[in-house]
Image (cartoon, helix red, strand yellow):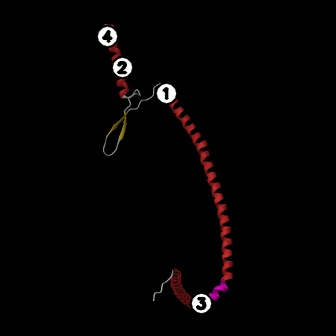
Amino acid sequence: MENTVTWGELIKIVLFLLGAGALFYLILAMANLVGILKNVNKMLTKNRASIDSTLEKLPEITENVAKVTDIVKDEMEGIQKVMGNIGKISDTAKDAAEMIKKDIVVKAKNLLDVIDWIRNVFQDKNKRKKEIVYKYKYKPVSETVEEEVTSSGRSNESQKEDEAGSKKENEQDNTNGE
């Protein structure tokens, strides 16, 4: 009883087992698909009235969507016009700011220069400008600025400098004379 199995027979057996497994899997998939289709059928019969009313209202819904689309289109055109007007307004404001900068500020500066020149003309009556000396004293609460001006219109420090200069000239004259 020696039966030998050839390669051809072995391949046939393996293919038969694989085909049987695939057929079993296919039967399980079909059973699940039939169950799903039964559930879908139950839902359709249960909600038949709602589905019918929705299908009847569908043309009205599409008309409303078309109206809303037209309204949105019109509003977008209006918004584009408003944005264009805002651009024009901002350009006008920019031009106005440049005009103020160029015309009014320059004229105000020129006016201030003229006023400063007039003030300088009237200050130079004595041909000497009034020197102002600021002395700062530290106070914990606040700082104050004091101005000391002598009756001749000169500060104490400038008078001291003039006196020191005249003393040096006198000393030089005395050393040169000896």
Where residue 56 appears, x then y in whole percent?
67, 86
The disc, 4 or 3, on the residue closer to the chain's N-terminal end is: 3
The disc, 1 or 4, on the residue closer to the chain's N-terminal end is: 1
Label 4: few (<14), some (14–19) or many (≥20) C-alpha neighbours in 10 Å? few
| SS assignment for the magenta stretch, majority | helix
- Image quarter where the N terminus lies is bottom left
- Identify the element where label 2 is drawn: helix
Three-letter code for the amino acid on which mark 3 is drawn = Leu
Three-letter code for the amino acid on which mark 2 is drawn = Gly
Structural distance between the alpha carbons of marks 1 and 4: 38 Å
Where residue 74 appears, x then y in whole percent?
68, 68
Residue underneath mark 4? 175
Q: Residue furthest top?
A: 178
Structural distance between the alpha carbons of marks 2 and 4: 16 Å
- Identify the element where label 1 is drawn: helix
The disc, 1 or 2, on the residue closer to the chain's N-terminal end is: 1
Q: Which residues are magenta?
A: 41-57
Structural distance between the alpha carbons of marks 1 and 3: 107 Å
